[in-house]
Image (spheres, rainbow, N blue to C red):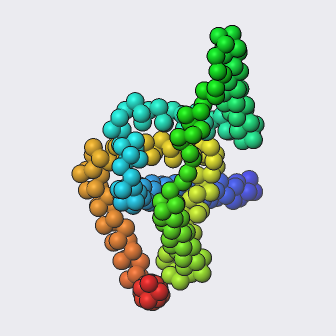
């Protein structure tokens, strides 16, 4: 009898631990799946919006668009290969060393060619002029001031826009937006565990050279799926607003203040 009484709590503990482990595992799996799905949807929507914004921003730079959209495959492939090679070299060697060796290589080539021309002139008894004279006299290096000012103005506008957005998010002007921003930052902590900065930079460059072209070819189904995803997100936001009405008030007030600021 004593053994049976002693064994009952042990069996109960085993069953309790098994049920607790099963519930915990199920909850973690559901949360991980939901957060991963939300992260993937957010990334896809962000990439879609960023692609639209980049296309509008680069609309006047047709040469850049031609490279990104692979109008000339040889030129785009060469630029992509050189960019990836430069990133890998800079990741393996210090920046100062790379710049120094590149400068020494260029200087060695130009100086060697200059000395060769001087020796050739001495042998042939001719005037050993500078072979780079045409580049020194006719082609002066200068920057177009108007374009520089335009680019700086555009950069300042983007910095101000990002600064205002971050201020609204960190100072919790809208509770819903700040919570979503916090979830995004939390998701990025997992991204940082999966990828290094170099890997993210390489993926970003590959995305620049692939996503616009893919979107150009398959823009109809992509737009349709993005529209469906946005509808689901809007429905989720509407449901949250109905369940927690005080968040809706704060969000509406923040939107009014944001419109007044503009």
Q: How many marks?
A: 0
Seen at 56% across and 45% down, the residue is: 140
Q: Residue drawn 47% across and 60% down?
A: 147
- Whether residue 105 sits left or right of residue 131 in the image: it is right
Figure check: 53 above or below 251: above
> Residue 96 location, x and y as percent?
75, 41
> Residue 212: x, y in percent?
37, 47
Quarter location, residue 143: bottom right
The answer to whether residue 211 shows anywhere in this view is no
Q: Residue furthest left?
A: 220
Q: Residue at x 73, y 57 (%)?
A: 6
Image position of 80 with respect to 116: above or below: below
Residue placed most toward the observer, 167 or 78: 78
Eyeballing the image, is 164 above or below 131? below
Q: Nearer the viewer, residue 126 or 77?
A: 126
Q: Is residue 44 or residue 99 the one in the foreground?
A: 99
In this rendering, does residue 108 appear at all? yes
Q: Position of residue 68 (x, y in %)?
A: 40, 44
The quarter in which the C terminus is drawn is bottom left
- Residue 92 falls left or right of residue 206: right
| Rendered-image quadrant of the N terminus | bottom right
The quadrant where residue 89 appears? top right
Residue 45 in percent (x, y) is at: 39, 59
Q: Nearer the viewer, residue 214 or 39?
A: 214
Relative horizontal placement of residue 255, taking residue 219 as reference (left or right): right
Residue at x-position 51% and y-position 32%? 81
């Amino acid at each position: 009898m004593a053994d049976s009484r002693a064994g009952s709590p042990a069996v109960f503990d085993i069953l309790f631990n098994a049920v607790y482990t099963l519930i915990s595992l199920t909850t973690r799996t559901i949360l991980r799946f939901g957060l991963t799905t939300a992260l993937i949807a957010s990334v896809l929507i962000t990439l879609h919006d960023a692609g639209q914004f980049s296309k509008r921003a680069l609309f006047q730079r047709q040469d850049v668009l031609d490279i990104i959209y692979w109008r000339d495959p040889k030129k785009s492939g060469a630029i992509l290969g050189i960019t990836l090679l430069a990133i890998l070299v800079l990741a393996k060697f210090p920046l100062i060393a790379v710049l120094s060796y590149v400068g020494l290589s260029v200087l060695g080539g130009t100086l060697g060619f200059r000395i060769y021309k001087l020796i050739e002139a001495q042998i042939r008894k001719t005037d050993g002029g500078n072979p780079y004279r045409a580049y020194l006299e006719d082609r002066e290096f200068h920057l177009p001031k108007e374009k520089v000012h335009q680019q700086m103005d555009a950069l300042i506008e983007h910095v101000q826009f990002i600064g205002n957005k971050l201020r609204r998010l960190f100072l919790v002007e809208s509770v819903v937006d700040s919570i979503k921003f916090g979830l995004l930052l939390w998701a990025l902590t997992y991204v940082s565990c999966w990828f290094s900065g170099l890997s993210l930079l390489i993926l970003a460059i590959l995305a620049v050279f692939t996503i616009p072209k893919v979107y150009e070819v398959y823009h109809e189904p992509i737009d349709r799926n993005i529209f469906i995803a946005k509808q689901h997100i809007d429905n989720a936001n509407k449901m949250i607003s109905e369940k927690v009405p005080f968040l809706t008030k704060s969000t509406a007030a923040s939107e009014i203040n944001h419109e007044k600021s503009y």
